[in-house]
Amino acid sequence: MQKEAALFVYVDISNSRTIFSAMSEGTAILNDFVDMLNTAYKDILITPFSIKDGDAIVGGVRDFTALLHIYSNCLTHYYSEDFKTSFKHLPAVQNETLNFYFGAGIGYIDTQSDNINIVNGTSIINAIEASNIAKTITKSQTNQKKSAVSNNENYFFAKQPFKFYCLADSQSFGNVVNALFFLAFEQLIRSDKQQQLFRVKDEHPEYSNIEIGMEMGYSTLSKADISSRISVLMANSDYYLYTKVRQDIIHFLVDLQKIMKGSA
């Protein structure tokens, strides 16, 4: 069987043994993300998302461009009212201190299967290793300045609850992905309000300024004040550059998949 280019994702909960009072709490959170991801990407799944090693989820898709959407959807789901309501008894969810190590693996699959314990190939190996690298970077950089890029010259995602790292068979490709994600999700977001604004606009591109403001919690203000606040927030942000970088990520992943399919 010819090997297939694939994207696998391995997401590990940070400090799961200390942040939860029972293992079942972490399992419930992982199952919640598993259900969300399998529903959203059912048409392109190679291996459905499932729990792996007790405190992580792993799954694979055949479309590289899904990486940006999977990462963004994880962020949107994390901050959603539905997620917070489902886990209102967990302080780490309510105070948004729950973190994950998000490993993306770009490579090939040699043995395809719906069973994560059977599937193998460089893609899944890269995803697991990428998650481990994200963990190492986070632990080594936690006490340094937020934008620090030192030690192994890797990117520290301080602002996001999903600490991102990508490994590819040719790591120069993975490094490009890491740099673009770091620019989009760290460097171009300068405040919590900007981060919330970007998430709402990503999820609801059709929303007016007033609808965006309502979603962001400005419902007690007049419509004129809501519109004004969002206009100022947009004017002081790099949102349009952020969207340009996101488009560039998609274009790069499209071209990378063509290259890898051609060499399979």
Image (cartoon, rainbow, N blue to C red):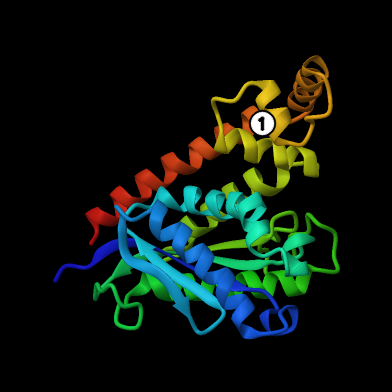
On the image, which quarter does residue 25 sit in? Answer: bottom right
Query: Is residue 11 something one can see in this rendering?
Result: no
Q: In this view, which residue lies farthest toward the left?
A: 1
SS class, disc 1:
helix
On the image, which quarter does residue 221 sit in? Answer: top right
Residue named by callout 1: 239
Point out residue 16 in the picture as x, y percentages from the top left corner: 67, 79
Q: In which quarter of the image is the N terminus?
A: bottom left
- Left or right position of 207 against 94: left
Report the residue at 34% width, 52% height from top. Answer: 63
Classify 48 as above or below 15.
above
Point out residue 264 in the picture as x, y percentages from the top left corner: 23, 62
Report the residue at 57% width, 37% height from top. Answer: 202
Classify 20 as above or below 251.
below
Point out residue 62 in the picture as x, y percentages from the top left corner: 31, 57
Point out residue 207 in the picture as x, y percentages from the top left corner: 59, 25
Classify 123 as above or below 79.
below
Classify 262 as above or below 210.
below
Report the residue at 16% width, 67% height from top. Answer: 2
- Left or right position of 115 against 56: left
**Residue nearest the observer in this picture, 207 or 162:** 207
Query: Is residue 61 something one can see in this rendering?
Result: yes
